[in-house]
Amino acid sequence: MQVSARSFFSLTRASWRETLVLMAIAWLVPFLVHLIPWSGSLPLGVHMLPAFWTAFVAVYLYGAGIGVLVALVVPAVNTLTTGLPVSGRVLAMSVELVAYVGLVALALRRWPSLRLIAPLAWLPAYAIALAAQWVVPAFGPVGNPFAHYAGTLANVWPGLLVLLALNAVLVRLLPKDADWEDE
């Protein structure tokens, strides 16, 4: 199994129509989640991680290139339509989603039938985004990154469970065999 930059970021796996549909769904899913009545202290999307659902599906079905396109639609378009994520968080969320897509793509190449990739890839992706926030002042203050990471983990576990279920369903219904990259 050889990974090249061309195969990793290939845009040939999905037609433009499929890509546009995925991008529309990537906007629609978080939009609908944010419309669900919720009285918690944080928006429901913070707990459920809907942007990662569509990013994972895009990477699983079409690879990292399409996954990045789909992932980058979510923060910008949802900020314009729902106000979430708040404008100061858009760049950090974009970094987090791109890191997530890259980690998922790498993990899928190594372990295509592993049902834990979706939730496990979120953990280092969030750490990467948090490190970027901590190092680059333009992202805004974070405070203690370790306390922030632990607090976030306490909030996002429902979304990680959704990612786990989504990952398990895709592996069960659309399994990738050892030579799935050659298709």
Image: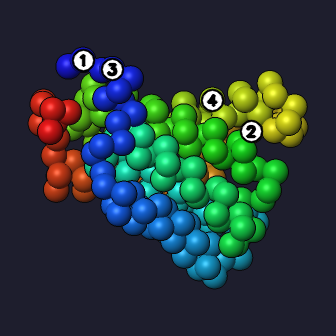
Q: Nearer the viewer, mark 2 or mark 4?
A: 4
Q: Is residue 26 left or right of residue 178?
A: right
CA gap, disc 3 and disc 1: 6 Å
CA gap, disc 1 and disc 2: 37 Å
- Mark linked to residue 148: 2
**Quadrant in the rendering for residue 179:** top left
Q: Would you call the spot at circle 3 few (<14 residues within 10 Å), some (14-19), or many (20 or more)?
A: few
Front position in the image: 130 or 82? 82
Amino acid carrying mark 2 in the image: His
Q: Would you call the spot at circle 1 few (<14 residues within 10 Å), some (14-19), or many (20 or more)?
A: few
Q: Which residue is mark 1?
A: 2
Picture coordinates of residue 180, whole percent (x, y): 16, 36
Direction bottom: furthest residue: 37
What secondary structure is found at the residue carrying circle 1? loop
- Mark linked to residue 4: 3
Amino acid carrying mark 4 in the image: Ile
- Examine the rendering and report whether any part of residue 80 can be seen: yes
